[in-house]
Image (cartoon, rainbow, N blue to C red):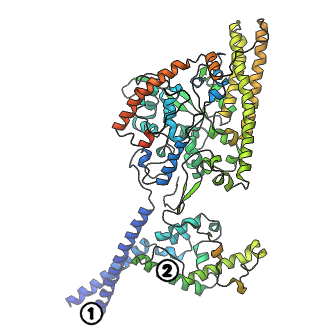
Amino acid sequence: MKKNTLILVIAILGISFMTYMMLSIGERKQEQAILNTAPIIKAEGIETRSDKWADAYPHQYDTWKQTAESNEIEDMVKKYPQLAILWAGYGFSKDYNAPRGHANALISNRSTLRTGAPTGPNDGPMPMACWACKSPDVPRLMQEHGELEYFTGKWARAGDEIVNPIGCGDCHSSQDAQLTITRPYLKRGLDAIGMTEDKITYQDMRSLACAQCHSEYYFKKTPYTDKDGKDQIAAVVTFPWAKGLAAEDMEEYYNEIEFKDWTNKMSKAPMLKAQHPGYEIFTTGVHFKRGLACADCHMPYTQKGAIKFSSHKIQKPLNDIANTCLTCHKQSEKEFKDIVQEKLDRKDQLNVIAMDNLAAAHLTAKKAWEVGATDAEMAPVLATIRSAQWLWDYSIASHGSFFHAPGETLRLLGVAGSKAQEARITLAGILANYGVINYQIPDISTKELAQQVAGVPFEKLVKAKLDFKKGLMQEWITDAKEDGRLTSTFVEDLPVKSAYPQN
Amino acid sequence: MKLETALRYGAMLAVAVAIGMGAYLTKESKATSYLSSDAKACINCHVMESYYATWEHSSHRERAVCVDCHLPVDNYIDKYASKSLDGWNHSKAFTLNTYGRRMLISDDGARRVQENCIRCHASRSKTLIKNVDRYHAFDSENLGDRKCWECHREVPHGKVRSINGTPNNLGVKWDR
């Protein structure tokens, strides 16, 4: 009896102690789970308002805000009037500026003359696709209504929905803040090159988050039946990656499907417009080949007190050489700036030569049509011009290609300039057949002259745009604020700048 | 007689429950993981996460796990005595929540780490052998009480170490 009592008491003491330990362990495990879980910004879907992320990620948000500092307008058509001829008959001849910071994305998009001056939801020159890279509201709408539905209709259709500029929700999951691909067209592009999701590493993601937008694309006409049973056609952003990422691979892809973005108003050539193949051309450069990602140089680690975080002031690394280039290279800042300037100068020289030749080719072709050249005579020349301008555009349309891939950029500019020269030689022959010798192209030495030649009604466009900005655009903002889609006064108060006068 | 029977069955039942609970507790507390030298055993307690994260992002990751530096390795008695003592102190502190906000290595812990620095580096690092000067000649008196990490301050746990200050310390990892 004594023995049993003793065993019982010991066992009960053991059980009590173990119960206490079990409770204690449970509590610790709960603590651990809380520590190891990123804050949930939104339980489902995408939180598009970056200001709502600020509580959980104050440093990232603060540095993101600083992207607004990059807001100066550099009028590229003024700098290179040839561009108005190269893009004659296409939006870019109206207005084309150097890139600005992420926070300014929507202001730029609404302000550019390219998006026109719609007066209602079904008006204007541009499709919905033109918002695609400007805002986390885009993937939100795609999730809510479907991708094809999103890509249907005019740009002005969703002006009151798309109100938050490029921000947190574009690259991060609102549930756990991990990097994520919000744009389905990048997923399809990756599928096309055999880069399936299970092969993607974290380092890949630090570039692919950017590649969602900094890539070449075209609008693929896709018929479908909407939920009301009506036949619709969506203009779906599609990456032409199926044959590879190089300029020649994409050219082959476009030629095979006989695609053209528009017909040049001067030469009548069926043209391609390279958008911004930044990711693609980066993959041909040495920094990519050494395993670097976009974020390594554009989002360097920064320290604030004891907190170390990656800067979300995405900008050119040259603004912060000490924390970017110099973490690997051992030169002085001055030496670095000089090296980069040298690369830029080399590119600029070949760029101007290629543009001059392309503009001359377009204008000479126009003359050839005027004096009676036939389709059969012109077709091969126009194909050469198309190819030349594509290669030129691919090499310079993305930001910073001269640095991302200097060798490839110079090669493409060289080939483009040479092809444009070829076209000019053939055209000189055609003109001679019709008795025109020594044709001089018109004066296109300033933006005004070049736009006149290209038939851009600049004054009219500006006037309509200003009316739009005072009218429909204000309605969009008011609606978005009322419905709670836009909650940030920071975004609302960003200064509006443009290449044309604001009043 | 009846009481005695009840006591006997009661005792048997209690022992069975205790054994069952013991087994469950062993599993829940991951007690068996402490028999291994896996570094992950050290982050059973979340206070060690920032130390784990900094080590995992250091070059030492390739050569040495926690116990290679923090426990004596050439003497089994010393090793298991140290391991038991640390284990007892750590579980006591963590369970009763008596550890301070600023955790520092104990004198005995520092002795072990210093011995392990020398054990590997004195024989393996050519640079060190070449640079045997007043700070690196371990047998000279000039060294005094100095420890390796008084100069090599970032090895291997970095300068920044706190729950939210340590880079990559969030347990959520990119896991696709």
Q: Label 1 belongs to which residue?
A: A1
Residue A252 sits in quarter: top right
Of residue B52 and residue A363, the one placed in the foreground of this image is: A363
Extreme left residue here? Answer: B2
Question: Which chain hosts label 1?
Answer: A
Question: Which residue corresponds to the image point at 69% horizontal and 31% vertical from the top-left?
Answer: A248
Q: Label 2 belongs to which residue?
A: B87
The answer as to whether the residues below labels 2 and 1 share one chain is no
Q: Position of residue A272 (x, y in %)?
A: 63, 25
Query: Relative to A81, does residue A71 appear above or below in the rendering?
Result: below
Badge 2 local density, few (<14 within 10 Å), some, or many (20+)? few
Structural distance between the alpha carbons of marks 2 and 1: 38 Å
User: Which tag is nearer the camera, tag 2 or tag 1?
Assistant: 2
Residue A37 sits in quarter: bottom left
Of residue A471 and residue A160, the one placed in the foreground of this image is: A471
Residue A449 sits in quarter: top right
Classify mark 1: helix, strand or loop: loop
Query: Relative to A339, does residue B37 appear above or below in the rendering?
Result: below
Is A169 situated left or right of A285 in this image? left
